[in-house]
């Protein structure tokens, strides 16, 4: 019986040592894996930092657009453009105003000449009516005289 108890005791001790050994192996594995992960992460972060710095250097060394390099020219050019536009619009408006004035003057002259012609036509119409009226009286007299002759 004593042998059985010792045997049981040794078996239990062996199982616990194997179990502890297994967990130590798992712990060592996990520590190694974590260390590798951390090392890889650090290397990746360093590489990303280097690439980021390299990209920043490329962007800062890139040629600037012409309008950024010539900032001192933009204001005078803008002012010249505004002046040119103002002068152009003013000349177009003046030309339009002159053309409108000329057209208005021509229309006024046309209306005045048309009114004069209309007055002349009215006076001619009244003369024609008077002539027709006189002719009608003469025709009546002739017809009356002709009826008397018969």
Image: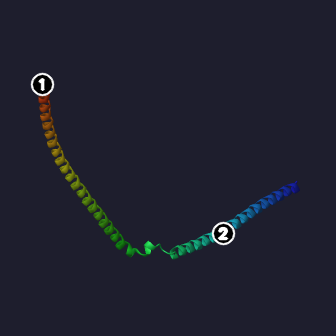
Q: Which residue is identified by label 1?
A: 149
Q: Is residue 1 left or right of residue 29?
A: right
User: What x and y, as percent, mark residue 58?
Assistant: 55, 74
Residue 101: name its quadrant: bottom left
Q: Residue sitting at 32 percent across and 68 percent down?
A: 84
User: What x and y, as percent, mark residue 125?
Assistant: 16, 40
Dot label at residue 27? none
Secondary structure type for disc 1:
helix
Residue 10: name its quadrant: bottom right
The relative height of residue 1 versus residue 127 in the rendered view (above or below) is below
Q: Residue sitting at 28 percent across and 64 percent down?
A: 90
Q: Is residue 110 left or right of residue 81?
A: left
CA gap, disc 1 and disc 2: 148 Å
User: What x and y, as percent, mark residue 100?
Assistant: 25, 56
Of residues 82 and 61, the one nearer the viewer is 82
Dot label at residue 40? 2
**How would you rate the neighbour count of disc 1 (Cα within 10 Å): few for under 14, some for 14-19, many for 20 or more?**
few
User: What x and y, as percent, mark residue 71?
Assistant: 40, 74
Secondary structure type for disc 2:
helix
The relative height of residue 66 versus residue 150 in the rendered view (above or below) is below
Which tag, 1 or 2, sits closer to the chain's start?
2
């Amino acid at each position: 019986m004593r042998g059985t108890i010792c045997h049981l005791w040794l078996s239990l001790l062996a199982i616990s040592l194997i179990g502890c050994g297994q967990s130590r192996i798992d712990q060592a594995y996990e520590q190694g894996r974590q260390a590798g992960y951390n090392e890889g992460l650090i290397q990746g972060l360093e590489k990303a930092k280097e690439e980021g710095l390299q990209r920043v250097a490329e962007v800062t060394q890139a040629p600037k657009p012409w309008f950024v390099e010539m900032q001192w020219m933009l204001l005078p050019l803008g002012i010249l453009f505004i002046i040119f536009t103002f002068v152009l619009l003013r000349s177009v408006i003046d030309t339009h105003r002159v053309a409108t004035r000329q057209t208005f003057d021509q229309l006024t002259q046309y209306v005045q000449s048309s009114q004069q012609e209309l007055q002349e036509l009215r006076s001619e119409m009244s003369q024609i009516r008077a002539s027709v009226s006189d002719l009608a009286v003469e025709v009546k007299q002739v017809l009356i005289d002709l009826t008397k002759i018969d």
